[in-house]
Image (cartoon, grey):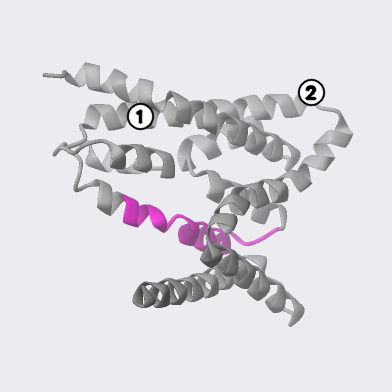
Amino acid sequence: MTSSREEFFQGITTGLPVFFSYLPVAITFGLLARTGELNIFQTVSFSALVFAGASQLIALNLLSLGVSIPEIIATTFLVNLRHLLMSASLITRIKETPLLPILGLGVTDESFAIASLKPAPVSAGFLGGLQITGYLGWVVGTAIGFGAGQILPEILRQAMGLAIYALFIALLAPAAIRSRTVFVVAIIAGGINWGLALIGLEQAGIRIVLGILGGAAIGTIMEHKGGREN
């Protein structure tokens, strides 16, 4: 019978690919935060307390645009709403433990995918080791990125402002190529944002929230219609 300690170290071993996959994105976040004039404490605390890659990048971009805090909270809440579904699914596969609320804070797309593929029940030790490994990759990568930003030439630091948009495209493109629905949703969400800007809605956060809701609604209709046809 596998002990809790062995399961914990098994989770760490399984999580090593996640650790290294988080590093480049976290380094980019650290670089962008340094370019956006956050200090080292703010930057590392951002990753340590939030631990949500896409949402952090979006929040950082909104901060640079001067968007209000309530708008940033609403936007990141919608982006992270998928974690509600992932946690609800994962809780049915985890052994009963008083650590469930803590483990819920560490759920990411990658840890959810790995835990979902592991035969149930998944131990708290394994999931904890898996999550800690990914968490360290994100926080350490953020610190490395911030440090690298201090030694980069000024012209490269200024150019990093464009990197966030390139990163969003890189994250979206594979999914859009695989799925027509994702492609359509992205176009619609972007179109709503652009259209609202044209008619004079200046609050970028509100435009993004409405774009997310509009794109999600169309995507849901498309998926439902596709499921019925199949």
Q: Is residue 80 magenta?
A: yes
Which residue is tagged 1?
130
**Spatial CA span between label 1 and label 2:** 33 Å
The prevailing secondary structure element of the residues shown in magenta is: helix
Tell me the amino acid under the disc marked 2: Ile
Q: Position of residue 112 (x, y in %)?
A: 35, 43
Give the residue displayed 67% in from the left and 46% down from the top.
167
Q: Quadrant of the C terminus?
A: bottom left
Q: Position of residue 188 (x, y in %)?
A: 61, 73
**Secondary structure under badge 1?**
helix
**Would you say 37 lies left or right of 80 here?**
right
Q: Position of residue 206 (x, y in %)?
A: 60, 70
Q: Which residues are magenta?
A: 66-86
Q: Is residue 105 magenta?
A: no
Q: Quadrant of the N terminus?
A: top left
**Would you say 228 lies left or right of 167 here?**
left
**Would you say 175 lies left or right of 163 here?**
left
Mark 2 is surrounded, within 10 Å at the Cα level, by few (under 14), some (14 to 19) or many (20 or more) other residues, namely few
Give the residue displayed 30% in from the left and 18% down from the top.
9
Q: How many marks?
A: 2
The label shown at residue 11 is none
Q: Nearer the viewer, residue 41 or 216?
A: 216
Tell me the amino acid under the disc marked 1: Leu
Residue 3, quarter of the rendered image: top left
Which residue is tagged 2?
151
